[in-house]
Amino acid sequence: MPFVVAITIGLLVAAGLYRLLGRTKIDTLIGLILISQGANLTLFASGGLKHNAPALLYGQDPATMTDPLPQALVLTAIVIGFGILAFLLTLVVRSQPK
Amino acid sequence: MNAEVILIIGLLAPLIGAVGCLFVGSRRPLPDGVAIAASTVSLTMALTLVALCANGSVHAVHAGSWPAPFGIVLVSDGFSSLMMSVSQLVVLASLIYANRSIGDRLRRRHFFPLVLTLSFGANGAFLTGDLFNLYVWFEVLLLSSFALMAALGGAKARLGTWTYVVINLISSLLFLVSAGLVYGKTGTLNFADLKIIIQNTESAFLIESSAALLLGAFAIKAALIPLAFWLPAAYPLLPPALSSLFSGLLTKVGLYALYRVFAMVFAGDADFPHREILFGVALVTMIGGVLGAVGQGDMRRILSFHIISQVGYMALALALFTPLAIAAGIFYLVHHIVVKANLFLVSGLVEKHAGSSSIQRTTGLLHSAPGIALLFAIPALSLAGIPPLSGFFAKFTLLRAAVEKGDVIAITVIVAVGLLTIFSMLKIWRAIFWGNRSDKVSPVPRSMTQTSFALGLVTIFIGLACAPVFELAQSAANGLLEPAAYLDAVLGSGNPKAP
């Protein structure tokens, strides 16, 4: 599982960097979206990846639970990233010649 | 009122003001009044915090009363309260200045609430005691600055805005990944808790990768060469009230984060070569910035390159890493924020008066507007480091720290870059203020000159009352290097994790 996630993060960032260096603003935007997904996935994986373990069940042994904090962090990061990318898209649209 | 309440009011006043601005519409004097009132409240609270923290005490607010490594903490120590008050001073100046300089109704509607949310983000970044929250506050700050640039920069500044947004987004992603790595490796994001873990570890494994990413992220935000070229692309095209605010605030929040993280949190026995890297980068930034300024033909572009050069000085102070150097760096930050913001305000006065701030087209302001010449002379001489203004003491203490360390390269570069700074201030002076009087001049609203004059007075005050201000900087530097009070305030004195 960590192996698959690590490879996915690597692919996302590599593909993102490639698109980021493209010629048009849309290229840059798509590149940023891919890299930010890679960053979110890194954050998500930072608490350790447990298979089939929910976060925070009351009265259970902590060893059987997933760390809930990275999930909360990644949720915050996704929301912020979404807002900023929406803003960037507006900039792209506004800068197109009418 | 106890310190916790003061901290919360100081933090939230700009947010409440921003919401208020949205309700009162855009007609003078309503939004300006609300914004200026909110900013004044925040400034007063920040100054109170400076007074409370001057003796080295630290005040922490635990949100929701969650114990420290688990909940969100807001901490006010010497450094953060000092930074908060200086930045709020610049916000207040820019709001008063914009009252007359931004006349367009649509722009006024955006300007006041967004500047307040920007200062809300800056306050939060200064006060937070947690790495992930620092990221979130940075985003609050950046998103407001993006919107301000897009709304006020207009078509001319569009390319600069795009560059600025993209490079800052990349910096945020580096920051985010590094926060994830820190959490993965140490299991905590709280500065105080991290400090204890890093202090007690021998292996560099815990800090290497995260420190490298953080250095990259903050170097972009602080505009250190080679990651600084977004700055001269974006700043000169903005309205003066805005470029003054940005030059005083944005890169300095990045520097604050560098100081907080690399002087306090990531400073332990385990070794990561960030100080050597920072040292090289700082020297290149100082030289590159000042040489970049030489080739520019517009007052605002020259000033933009000088931001980069001056940021190098402050990064150098961090890289030297002696108690005197850190104190000198903090003093430099305080002095620089006021001076740089003021120089951009003066460039706005020049533009309003003569119609342009290009050094080819504008001449003779010494005859047509001697007042503006005086207002320029104060911060310009201070930036160049002429006694008895604030810049002299900033440069002098930094030089002294370098001499005590016996670092010949640093000494040479500090002196040489100082001389080149005088040279480019002279270039502006000679072209814009000397020469033949031009006829096409228009009067400048009094509130704009008065704002600049007030900031000039602050510069003179910091210069004349250098000893008490430097004592504040020294106590702030001690708080970073010996954070026992910080750890106590955040984790509680009876905490088993405390050393």
Image (spheres, coloured by chain):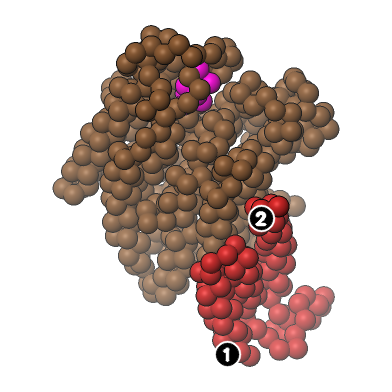
Chain colours: A red, B brown
Residue on which disc 1 sits: A3
- Residue B472, located in which quarter of the rendered image? top left
Q: Chain of mark 2?
A: A
**Region rendered in magenta:** B346-353
Whether residue B123 is visible, yes or no, is no
Q: Is residue B436 above or below residue B244?
A: above
Give the secondary structure at mark 1. helix
What secondary structure prevails in the magenta region?
helix
Task: Name the residue rendered at 72%, 22% in the picture.
Answer: B33
User: Residue B350, how many percent across, how many down?
Assistant: 47, 21
Please tell me which residue lies in front, A37 or B321.
A37
Task: Name the residue rendered at 71%, 36% in the picture.
Answer: B110
User: Residue B8, how many percent across, how many down?
Assistant: 69, 39
Judged from this view, the residue extending furthest toward the front is A98
Earlier along the polypeptide chain: callout 2 or callout 1?
1
- Residue B464, located in which quarter of the rendered image? top left
> Which amino acid type is marked by label 1?
Phe
